[in-house]
Image (cartoon, grey):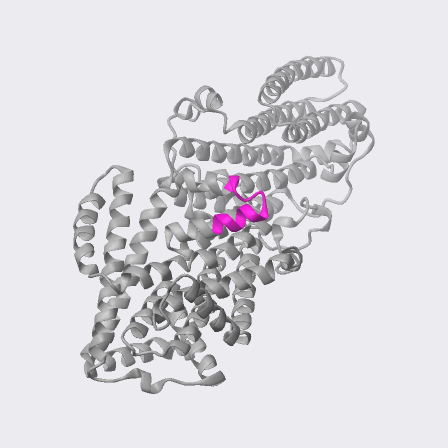
Amino acid sequence: MLGRLFLPTVLLLLAYGFWVSPEFQIISAGIVIFLLGMVYLERGFKVFTGGFLESLLKKTTNRLWKSLTFGITTTAVLQSSSLVSVIIISFLSAGLIGLGAGVGIVFGANLGSTAGAWLVAVYGLKLNLLTYAMPMLVFGLILRSQKEKNLHGIGFVALGIGLLFFGIHYMKLGFEAFQGVMDFSNYALEGFRGVMVYTLFGLLATVIMQSTNATMVLTFSALAVGQLTYDNALALAIGSNIGTTITAVLGAMGANASGKRLAVAHIVFNVITAVLAIAFLSQLKTAVDVIAELVQIGGDNYTLKLALFHSLFNVVGICVQLPFINILVRWLETLFVDPAGQGHLNLANTNSSEINRARYLTPATLSYPDTALRAMTQECAHLYRNTFELICYGIYLTGDRLRATDNLEEMVDNWVREEQPWTIKELYIRHIKGIYADIIRYSGEIEGNMPRQQVQELFALKVACRDFVQAIKHVKHIYKNMGQYLHSDNEQIRHQYNQLRLCLASVLKLVDLLGVRRNYDHIRQHAEQLKCELREQDEQMHTTLNELIRSSQVDSFMASSLLNDSAHVHDACTNLIDGAVIMLTRDREEYREIDLNFDSRFGGEKTGAERSGPENTAL
């Protein structure tokens, strides 16, 4: 009910403000133009993050001091802590960086975001920004219309900067106009009550506008024309620091457990920093006065002193909390349930009818191609692990037993899993279909935003997933006969079906081992060797089957079942090998060129999701 009333109430209040005060219209227009500039600026910088920022992030987060430095410098350059937060959550959700590195970047980003306050305090309120805004908008609009990617990105950046200048100009103009109508300094509050009230105002303003920079520009504009007292401006800066966590919170809503933990870290850091700033406000003010005198900032230059205070209390927050970062990370790791941290699927303990869905394909990973592709890789591996367990189930074994044994032949000959309460189709719907559907949906969402090389790799992953699903389909066809003939009185037919089980078990075991040793030549060599052995086994099966029929050791019904099931096992093994080789070598350029001839391999199939949807492989 409150949610339904909130938007109409805000709109009515704004309409009333526009009606009674032209000056309020000017300030509101400045805020909106400034926020639009931030949107364009972020969009422009995103053009240049495809590869450079991602690779830089991976190289500069292996040490805490590097993570901290990266957060400071990147946020200072991009002038957008929200963009950096989205990148961090995206990379963290995809597993490209660890939680400790993410927390370090968050610490640094808070300090880096204060660079914008310095720019506004030093230049923004003293220059005629319209002089610079007009050319930026003209050049930005021209460049934005260009098809070349870099020029297109530069155009958005130029438009963003031009709109930022326009927004600052109108906010300053609006507060100057208010001087002749109303003096907001009459509403100043002194003492602790003033600190708390204006801290709350700063928090709410930042949450509403979702921009610390917008709140600080508003604060600087009001302070510069005397509409706001220095002490109340300090409190607004503290409140804006807490309110900036809204970006991380919103970004984490579509993230996995790691992304949510980072949002909590952001809140913890900013709240503790704000508490320290409020508790030691008088000491910080004294420190600002001392530093201002040392660097020759005038005692009445409150805008520069506010910028100095903004940086100083963030430095204090980092210095106080940095020694406890490992404790913070360990505590964060206890928060939220991370399904990605679960072990292998255990069908013996799975009684729930709930349909499994993708673990790694979160909205947070969609922001950047590298993180999206990494998430797809992890999800394909998740699909394979479930495929492994279902195929083990289909040949009356268990994944745990298969992984643990060193003598597959002895295990297959002497052990048959007794408890089989579900059909393969039921298990497919529960543990495969939902994941596969999410993979196809997700790949369709990201494919249009990727360069050709990554599109090829993405499609290779989809082919691998389809191979795994096809392998399950083949095992589904042999499941009933295998259950019947493994308990047959006919020793020969039992032996032949155990040989089929051994064939599938051997391929599963070797694929697991290949996943540990990601040596390209080693994988290729063993894959070709496996396929040769499969062909030889298929030929041997036909020879043996003819001998068994001639000697009347099996009847024609048994022989026809064995012949069909042998073909299904051969195809299932081939699918598993092909899928595994793609998964393990998809990032090899020569493999894409040699093996991923999509049109010839799949009869002209396109790289879209239209033909590879889950419905075409329903069991």
Q: Residue at x 41, y 85 (%)?
A: 189
Depicted 325 relative to depicted 615: above or below: below
Q: Nearer the viewer, residue 29 or 255?
A: 29
The picture places residue 51, in percent across and down from the top left corner, at: 42, 38
The picture places residue 310, in percent across and down from the top left corner, at: 44, 65
Q: Residue at x 27, y 75 (%)?
A: 225
Q: Is residue 324 left or right of residue 206?
A: right
* Magenta segment: 58-71
Q: Which quadrant would the C terminus be assigned to in this image?
A: top right
Could you tell me if residue 159 is visible in this image? yes
Q: Residue at x 47, y 80 (%)?
A: 196
Q: Nearer the viewer, residue 547 or 566?
A: 566
Depicted 539 relative to depicted 492: above or below: above
Q: Nearer the viewer, residue 511 or 15?
A: 15
Q: Is residue 547 left or right of residue 601?
A: right
Q: Residue at x 69, y 36 (%)?
A: 392
Depicted 556 relative to depicted 230: above or below: above
The picture places residue 223, in percent across and down from the top left corner, at: 32, 74
Q: Which quadrant would the N terminus be assigned to in this image?
A: bottom left
